[in-house]
Amino acid sequence: MISAMRYLKNVVTLELDISRCTGCGKCEEVCPRAVLSLNDGKISISDRDACIECGACSRNCPFEAMTVAAGVGCAYAVIRGTLKGTAPDCACSDKYDCC
């Protein structure tokens, strides 16, 4: 199950400006974590805490309805923990802008 992995609750920078959404579904199509859902011709954020802030949705939205502070932060922590077989650890330092 893709969306089962979580890092921290309520820290994701993902935002949706529903007034700009045309329902094209491009953001939903490119989201690797199934965070978005297309319902009644509009996108909704259905699983915010599963977002890894990769930025695919915002980069592919032609109407600038999606915004996210993409970077290493939580995504780096989750990937690092998965690869090491440990809890998420972003090894925060001045080098990284962690959550």
Image: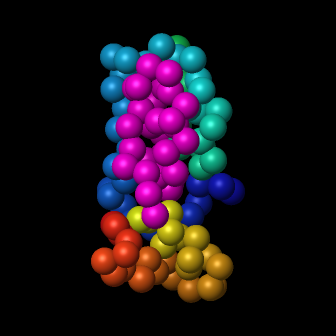
**Residue 73, percent from left and from top:** 41, 65
> For the C terminus, which image quadrant?
bottom left
Residue at x 65%, y 33% (from the top left corner):
29
State left or right for residue 18 relative to residue 83. left
Location of residue 64 by image quarter: top left
Tell me if residue 69 comes above or below residue 27 in the rendering.
Answer: below
**Residue 17, percent from left and from top:** 33, 26
**Residue 18, percent from left and from top:** 36, 22
Location of residue 96 by image quarter: bottom left
Q: How is the image coloured?
A: rainbow
Tell me if residue 15 comes above or below residue 39 in the rendering.
Answer: below
Q: Which residues are magenta?
A: 43-72
> For the N terminus, which image quadrant?
bottom right
State left or right for residue 51 relative to residue 94. right
Residue at x 60%, y 26% (from the top left corner):
26
User: Residue placed farthest to the right in the image?
Assistant: 1
Residue 40 visible (yes or no):
no
Tell me if residue 20 comes above or below residue 72 in the rendering.
Answer: above
In magenta segment, residue 19: no
Residue 32 visible (yes or no):
yes
Residue at x 60%, y 49% (from the top left corner):
33
In terms of depth relative to the viewer, which is nearer, 90 or 86?
90
In magenta segment, residue 68: yes
In terms of depth relative to the viewer, which is nearer, 46 or 61?
61
Residue at x 62%, y 76% (from the top left corner):
82
In terms of depth relative to the viewer, which is nearer, 68 or 51?
68
**Residue 65, percent from left and from top:** 40, 26
